Amino acid sequence: MKDFFISYTKADQSWAEWIAWQLENAGYTTIIQAWDFHAGSNFVANMQRAATESECTIAVISPAFFSSPYTEAEWTSAFSKDPMGTKRKFLMARVEDVKPTGLLKSMVYIDLVGLKDDEALDRLLKEITRERAKPEKCPVFPTKHERLETQPPRFPGVLPVRVFFILCTFSTDEIKKLIIKQNQIQNLFDIGIRIADWKSWAGRPNAEMNLKSLQKALELESKQVLKLEDKEQRESEIRKVLLKFCDEFQSHMSKFDKEHSDFGRLPFNGVNIAVTELQFPFNYYTWNTKDRNGVVVGIRSLKRLFQDEPQKVSKMIIRVIQRMCIYSLGIKDLKVHKDTKGCLFDFTQELKDIEFSVNENPMPICGQCRNTIEKEKNSQFLNTITEWIINSFK
């Protein structure tokens, strides 16, 4: 069963393909005529199968859509399954100035008209996962002088966070869905956590070739480093190797931004997180870049640590993302440590300690880190991020 069937007319094919591509890039599955119906197949049978084998139909609506007999058959079929719209079996994405009439007149649509690409993407992803917007906590009691514009804003993220999947041969669908879920359950970051469109970048082949070459060179260098007898010197050289590895990723992610920015055509000034299957030096599972605005997560090391349990690997990736999100807020004196098991900021290679991070933990931030965050921000802010971490996988 697919997540979405994209219903459209030929005049809106470019919009339909854009919507389908963005949904699949976000971790959903789609059926779309342009990609899935092949020459020689029965068009009507394909449409019927697509409509019945998808959880939801998204109609790309425009004046052309409502004048096509084929799209009319598609939307009426989907509409009949959920005429009240309670199960969200049928959604509309408006791409041109048109007002639905008849049965569709009362339906709320996803309005993409006049939006820039980043704005359209943000609205699309938010609307397809729309849940009731009732807040968990009681709103502040209003006074007669209180105005909407005087209400305190959401906690803003100083830096947006973007995730790259680089040299990954495994299916990224589940981890992408977990990332999308983080945007749905947290309100700290106005822009949210975004997934970079690495695969479609023209510079990707050269970048990946350079990364592979560096990894091989660092593998030889690492062997020499481990032979050093002086502990301080050895640890210093280990850090240098790790920084070389991570900075190379950051370099290519920066080139991606200059040549193929998927962040609304605006310069990206935020945190880059690279998830890769390329072997991490010294079997580490993560390390920061020199500028502290990037981090690399090694899938192979995590698989080895968790004995190839995919759920725990995905959860650990989310924990690293959460750590970097909170770091991006620029909280003074908030640093990683090796002292407290299960704390989000506990950086250790010991499996018995790491497992505390992915298991249910009623106190995911240690006392010292809690005091640091509360001192810089406030108790409400601390409670908000604590609830986010606790509810990440529920």
Image: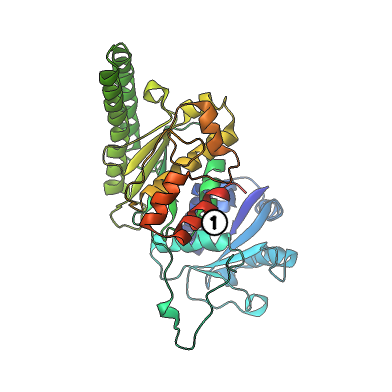
Which three-letter amino acid code belongs to the residue tagged 1? Answer: Ile
- Residue 44: x and y, percent? 68, 55
| Colouring scheme applied when the structure was drawn | rainbow
Helix, strand or loop for disc 1 = helix
- Residue 232: x and y, percent? 27, 21
- Image position of 62 (left or right of 206): right
- Image position of 92 (left or right of 208): right
Taking the image as drawn, is residue 314 in sight? no
The image quadrant of residue 243 is: top left
Image point (72%, 70%), residue name: 83
- Residue 386: x and y, percent? 51, 52
Q: Nearer the viewer, residue 44 or 278?
A: 278
- Residue 128: x and y, percent? 57, 60
Read off the residue under disc 1: 185
Image point (47%, 26%), residue name: 301
Taking the image as drawn, is residue 304 in sight? yes
Q: Is residue 180 above or below residue 218?
A: below
Mark 1 Cα shell of 10 Å, populated few (<14), some (14-19), many (≥20): few
Q: Is residue 227 above or below residue 149?
A: above
Image point (49%, 48%), residue name: 25
Q: Nearer the viewer, residue 75 or 89?
A: 89
